[in-house]
Image: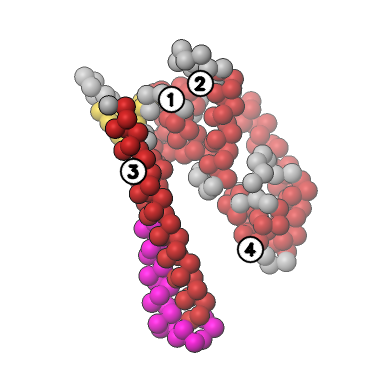
Amino acid sequence: MPGGRLTNEERQHIAAGLAEGLGYTEIGQRLGRPASTIMREVTRNGGPDDYGADQAHEATRHRARRHKQAQPPAPPVPDSSHGRDPQAVQDLTESFTTLLEQQGLPRMMARVLVCLLVTDSGTLTAADLVQRLRVSPASISHAVTFLEQQGMLRRERVPGVRRERYAIDDEIWLRSTLAALQMNEALAAASQRATEILGAATPAGARFESTGEFLLLVSESLQKAMEQWRQSRAARSAGRQ
């Protein structure tokens, strides 16, 4: 998926797609952009009925100028004495944040998560995150609550002081995949039920039957992948002992 900000030409295509009555997914497919990117662009610029390409482009430029004036760039992530190039780490941080945004994660949540991911300890306090990301404590609190609900981080008490820190571990994506698996299985079960109600011999019923079969295959693949990962991790741990 291409990254970066939308161009004026892409906004013209979005406006044309909305005028044709296309959904966000189809517009995104035409542009090679995620549907979530199209949805955010349209939502923040008047909605489907009032979206205008030129106005949206100018509004985005204005917001970018205002943001640049209001907030200095965040400092590079510390080297941590591992001989890393601080600028390379900063570029990685920005590119990975953009990638998570393109997958549908809100920007502030993506920034907090990546800030933790590139930290060797995997733990940071709210004060650490405020300093590194140059945002308000309220923004950090909101992002942490969201990520905690998704099982992507956990809260810990800092020993000896009345303060929390936020932590991630090696199973962050395993838990995320498990949540996706549970949702996928629920959709598969609902599709099977819909097939029974509508009748497999009808077009609508056949559509749900095909959907259910696909979702079951996806679930089986996810379960197999998670089990293989657990076995591989166990083998690595045993080899280090």
Labelled pair 1, 4 in contact (Cβ < 8 Å): no
Secondary structure beneath dot 4 equals: loop
The residue at 38%/63% (across/down) is 185
**Percent of width and height locating residue 90:** 56, 24
Q: Nearer the viewer, residue 80 or 221?
A: 221
Alpha-carbon span between mark 2 and mark 4: 39 Å
The residue singled out by tag 3 in the image is: 231
Tag 1's secondary structure? loop
Quarter in which the C terminus is drawn: top left
Q: Which residue is the site of mark 1?
A: 119
Q: Residue at x 46, y 84 (%)?
A: 200
**Disc 2 or disc 4, which is closer to the eye?**
2
Q: Hey, what amino acid is under mark 2?
A: Val
- Residue at the far left in the pictured view: 160
The amino acid pointed to by label 3 is Gln
What residue range appears in magenta? 181-204
44 is higher (above) or lower (below) than 24: above
Q: Quadrant of residue 229?
A: top left
- Determine if the magenta segment contains residue 227: no
Closer mark to the observer between disc 3 and disc 4: 3
Q: Secondary structure at mark 2?
A: loop
CA separation, marks 1 and 2? 8 Å
Q: Are marks 1 and 2 in contact (CB under 8 Å)?
A: yes
Image check: 7 left or right of 70? right
Mark number displayed over residue 77: 2
Among the two numbered marks 3 and 1 on one chain, the one whose residue lies closer to the N terminus: 1
Classed neighbour count for the residue bearing mark 4: other residues with Cα under 10 Å, few (<14), some (14–19), many (≥20) = some
- From mark 3 to mark 2, how far is it between C-alphas? 33 Å
- Callout 1: few (<14), some (14-19), or many (20+) C-alpha neighbours within 10 Å? some
Give the mark nearer the N terminus: 3 vs 2: 2
